[in-house]
Amino acid sequence: MLTLYRNARLCTLAGKQGWGLIDDGALLVRGQTLHWVGPTADIPTDAPITAEHDLHGALVTPGLVDCHTHLVYGGQRADEFEQRLQGASYEDIARAGGGIRATVRATRAASAAQLFADAHNRALTLLRNGVTTVEIKSGYGLSLEHEARCLRVARQLGAELPLTVRATCLSAHTLPPEFEGRADDYIDAVCAWLPQLQAEGLMDAVDAFCERIAFTPAQTRRVFDAARALGLPVKLHAEQLSDQGGAELAASYGALSCDHLEYLSAQGIAAMRRAGSVAVLLPGAFYFLRETRLPPVAALREAGVPMALATDHNPGSSPTLSPLLMLNMACTLFRLTPEEALRGFTVNGARALGLHDRGQLVAQQRADFVAWPLGHPNTLSYWLGQHPNCRVFIGGKEV
Ligand code: NIG
Ligand code: FE
């Protein structure tokens, strides 16, 4: 039972570099998997094709993987955006009790139904923009009850929407007010929550924010030890506002990824290369916080550290749901090539989640793909924030 999709311009991203273009291409899908990918002229003649679809010459790429989002939260922070435009810094606002803590208040005050409805809308918007796999972090609950509630929303989204949802526990996002002055006690609490969240099957990975306004390397290490004891992979918000040596620390735990990385050092790059950690670059946050320090893209490229891209959707530093805008910003702000940007939002995004079954259009990968009304894949990073009007296929079915 094979379904044929024909008349496509395929951008397979097969291999380690190049677009992998097949001008007059076709896909054969069996169940949720790509069975065969190649030029129309080579479609296997003995294949038992039971259904056939014409893609009318569309550009077909792997489905987009948004490997870093904070999709579940209450409220918004437009007032802080205005304060920052008037000169307040992100760190000033955080120290004054705003920032992540403002969203924690709004998230705790929201009903579970409201949290779900808002996150559902956001996930649907990502889906309509070509995203077929999304990672969702907790980190705006900061109590066992509220962290579990946010992670359950992520799990429920995965159950109700066709896209794949990976849930990451980011309870070590910032210090909640009830633990003021007692950061080590809060870390003890987080370490005690993890087995309970794990028993309910609520997490695929554990993340932390290692920063002056969040947690120290020593505190981050304790969270990672607790994750490791449960067999959970780790990721880290590292080197976003200062160099804390977070990437080296995360790499020593075999981190799936280190994310942000504006202040990443040469030692951090070397450690990530040895550990095989992915560098997740977040141009939306860089832009929205009006950062000036660029992540060391040329050195990462030189070292062969895989670079991924994501929206980092959240209400404080990156209120965007446009993957294509991130592709553009990665090129204009970070100097990625259009091909590196697309690989960052597909195959390398998948690697940042520990997923090796998606991100390229090759046989045996998941049949997650997007048909765009565009001619060449370099136009994906060219149209600036325009709605892509794409058709999205997940597990072989149009959604
Ligand atoms: O990825 N850096 C820390 N966490 C988020 C922002 C959180 C917020 O400001 O609400 C980020 O940028
Ligand atoms: Fe983030």
Image (tube, helix red, strand yellow):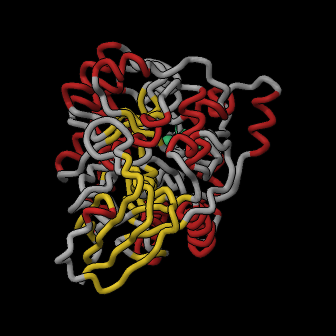
The residue at the point 35 percent across, 37 percent down is 18
Q: Position of residue 28 (x, y in %)?
A: 29, 70
The residue at the point 61 percent across, 68 percent down is 121
Question: 319 or 95, which is in the foreground?
Answer: 319
- In the rendered image, the vertical position of residue 390 relative to residue 100, given as above or below: below
- Image quadrant of ligand 1? top right
Q: Looking at the image, which residue sits at the far top?
A: 266
Question: 113 or 181, which is in the foreground?
Answer: 113
Q: Quadrant of the N terminus?
A: bottom left
Q: Position of residue 108 (x, y in %)?
A: 59, 60
- Can you see residue 228? yes
**Residue 48, picture quadrant:** bottom left
The residue at the point 54 percent across, 56 percent down is 71
**Residue 252, picture quadrant:** top left
- In the rendered image, the vertical position of residue 41 relative to residue 288, given as above or below: below
Q: Position of residue 273 (x, y in %)?
A: 24, 25
Q: Position of residue 147 (x, y in %)?
A: 45, 59
Count of numbered labels shown in the rendering: 0
- In the rendered image, the vertical position of residue 73 relative to residue 181, given as above or below: below
